[in-house]
Amino acid sequence: MLTLFAEYAFHLALELTSSMILVPYILVAAYGLHLALTGETYDRDPEGHTGDLLRASIAVLTTATALI
């Protein structure tokens, strides 16, 4: 009986920690997307804007689908 409860507790803890790590990741990805969309940090390197916009968009989309 105790091993069944311990296995459930471990599975719950694993699921909880893996879902909680997605919250800061989507916040960082969304902030990166915001910076890429506004272009406020591309004074020195405007060529990097398109690549960063693409990477930030992919990060936001994959994280949002993982949260759903």
Image (spheres, helix red, strand yellow):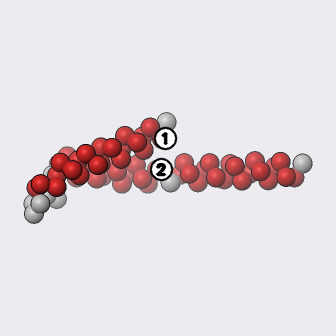
Quadrant housing residue 41: bottom left
Q: CA distance from mark 2 to mark 1?
A: 7 Å
Please give the name of the residue rendered at 90% of the width and 48% of the height, measured from the top-left corner. Answer: 1
Q: Amino acid at mark 2?
A: Leu
In the picture, the disc for residue 48 is none
Determine crowd level at label 2: few under 14, some 14-19, many 20+ residues with C-alpha closer than 10 A: some
Give the residue drawn at x 85%, y 52%: 3
Where, by quadrant of the figure, is residue 58 drawn?
A: top left
Of label 2 and label 1, which has the lower sequence position? 2
Residue 34 seen in render: no
Residue tagged 1: 67
Q: In terms of depth relative to the viewer, which is nearer, 20 or 3?
A: 3
Q: Residue at x 83, y 48 (%)?
A: 4
Report x, y in % for residue 32: 28, 53
SS at circle 2: helix
Using a 10 Å C-alpha cutoff, classify the residue at mark 1 as few (fewer than 14 neighbours), some (14 to 19) or many (20 or more).
Answer: few
Q: Which label is found at residue 22?
A: 2
Q: Quadrant of residue 28?
A: bottom left
In the displayed structure, does residue 49 sit left or right of residue 8? left
Classify mark 1: helix, strand or loop. Answer: helix
Labels 2 & 1 near each other (Cβ < 8 A) = yes
> Residue 46 at x, y = what percent?
10, 55
Amino acid type at mark 1: Leu
Tally of numbered discs = 2
Residue 52: give x, y in percent of width and height: 23, 52
Q: Is residue 50 visible?
A: yes
Q: Position of residue 8 (x, y in %)?
A: 75, 47
